[in-house]
Image: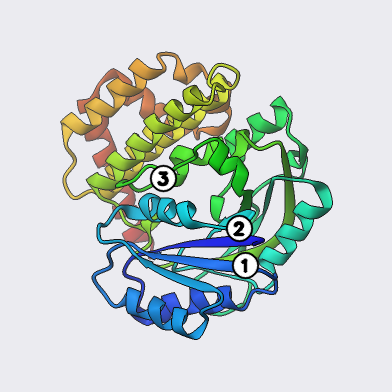
Amino acid sequence: MKLSIIVPVYNMASDQKLEYCMDSLVNQTVEDYEIIAVDDCSTDNSFAVLQDYERRFPDKIRAIHSEVNRHQGGAKNIGLRIAQGDWIGFVDSDDWIAPDMYRKLIERAEATGADLVGCDYCLTDEHSMKVGQIVPNNKKEQSGILDAQKRKSLILDGGSLVVKIFRRSMIMENELWFPEDIFYEDNALGNSYFVLAKHFEYIEEPLYYYYQHDASTVHTISVKRCEDRMAAGRLMLEEARRHQYYDEYLTELEYSFTLLFYVNTLFTYMAGVDRVRYSFVKAIGREMRQTFSDFEKNPYYRERTHAEEQKLIRMQQRSTLFFILYYKLLWAYRKWRKAHQK
């Protein structure tokens, strides 16, 4: 079999989100493929929807039900264990793809000998094939046989896993299983999926539709999700050590960890939770310094982190209490100014 498309599903039956995703998958123009849709113990009728598709498309769809909720990473692992395709693709169950996405990716792989091929995606808030805001997911210079410079670039700007195909043999040989029971599983494993490849090709075309709605992971803020992002950061470093690329790409990994574990988590937490806990903010700053004591000297951090964020991070490193008070005052002032500018 040429391709296995793995779709983790959890509570996506409302508003026909799941149907729109599945319709885009069953209508792919690539030949000889399977869709493995893994229901992650949904509490709605998502699995019934998948079973209906399996009845209607028995040659294409396998509907699997997990008795335990293991989050997207666990659902992906279930799919990986039974996948038969030479190539693996992942699709989130609230998104959809262009009819020729996988045909184009596989044709590029076969023409070049690549074991990793990606494209762009677009943002959309409506169920249609109208191309929304295009998000370039990679860079032209990353294409080709992967050397150290290209791998550094992929660690820094690898883009999303869902807009790519991966040779299944690479995944299995390197045992690239996703962490279970946490969100942000792609962040934990993404570097290994990129660095361990030998040849990457990039198609500059938005073939994936990333649906924007309030229930998606990136738009939902909670202490649990902040903790999961931190856990993903730790796992990212463990993966680099396990596959022995930690030392070679230490500068890039340090920045990636700083961004994932600390910068994004800190400001997401401060802006999104109902009650800020001093102990949480203190702990995250302390662990950041313990993991990489000189992270503020990292060249990527200095180049890519906004000056105001750097200022706030310096403040948090010196005094958590002062940082929290200052941040709250700054947030309140900005809300007041925005209200009075209308």
Q: To which residue does mark 1 refer? A: 33
Measure the C-alpha gap from mark 2 to mark 3: 22 Å
- Return the disc, 2 or 1, that comes first in the chain's sequence: 1
Q: To which residue does mark 3 refer? A: 185
Q: Secondary structure at mark 3?
A: helix
The image's mark for residue 85 is 2
The N terminus - image quarter: bottom right
The residue that appears at 41% across and 83% down in the rendered structure is: 52
The image's mark for residue 330 is none
Q: Secondary structure at mark 1?
A: strand
The residue that appears at 42% across and 76% down in the rendered structure is: 17
Mark 3 neighbour class, 10 Å CA radius: few under 14, some 14 to 19, many 20 or more: many
Q: Amino acid at mark 2?
A: Gly
The C terminus - image quarter: bottom left
Where residue 285 sits, quadrant-wise, is top left
The relative height of residue 300 versus residue 333 in the rendered view (above or below) is above
The answer to the question of whether label 2 and label 1 lie on touching residues, with beta carbons closer than 8 A, is yes
**Is residue 122 visible in the rendered structure shown here?**
yes
With 139 as the anchor, is 216 left or right in this view? left
Tell us which disc is closer to us: 3 or 1. 1
Q: Amino acid at mark 1?
A: Tyr
Which residue is farthest right?
111
